[in-house]
Amino acid sequence: MILVATMLLVGTVWIQGAFAAAERTVTLAVGHMTCATCPFVVRKALQQVDGVDTVRVDYESKTATVAFDPKIASVSDLTAATTRAGYPSEPTE
C-alpha cells in the first residue's frame, strides 16, 4: 500500500513538473484600463482562453502577466481576448 501511494505521488509530481516545463509566461501591456474594476474584466477575459494557467493583472503598471501552455494557446490568442473585452494589449517583450 505504501509503495503504491509513493508511486502515485512520484507520478503526480513528474506530471506536474512536465507541465511546468512546457508552460510559458508573457507580460502584456494593457490599454484602456482606467479604473480599479478594469483588471477584473481583463483577468476574466484571459482566464477564458484555453491553456491559460494563471493570470495576474496590475492596474498601476497597466500590465497582465499570464502563464499558459503554448501548445494550446498563443500570445495572439491572449491579446485577442483582451481586445475583444475592450482592452487592447501587446507583449512587453
Image (spheres, grey):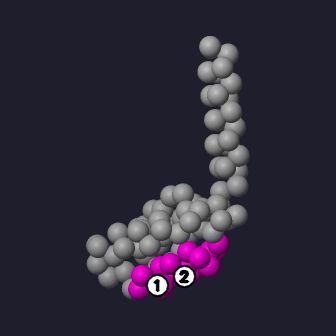
Q: What percent of the width, then of the height, locates residue 60?
A: 37, 71
Residue in the foreground of this view, choosing between 50 and 39: 50
At 45% from the left edge and 62% from the top edge, which residue is drawn? 56
Q: Classify residue 14 by image quadrant.
A: top right
Residue designated by label 2: 80
Residue 84, numbered circle = 1
State the residue in front, 8 or 40.
Answer: 8
Q: Quadrant of the N terminus?
A: top right
Labels 1 & 2 near each other (Cβ < 8 A) = yes
Name the residue located 64 percent from the left edge and 43 percent from the top edge: 16
From the image, which quarter does the C terminus lie in?
A: bottom right
Residue at point 70%, 55% (across, down): 22
Identity, as a three-letter code, of the amino acid under mark 2: Ala
Q: Residues within 10 Å of mark 2 (few under 14, many from 20)?
A: some
Give percent across and percent down for residue 10. 67, 29
Residue 15, position as x, y percentages in the image:
68, 41
Residue depicted at x 44% and y 73%: 45
Stretch of the chain drawn in magenta: 74-93
Rendering coords of residue 77 (x, y %): 59, 76
Q: Is residue 55 left or right of residue 41?
A: right
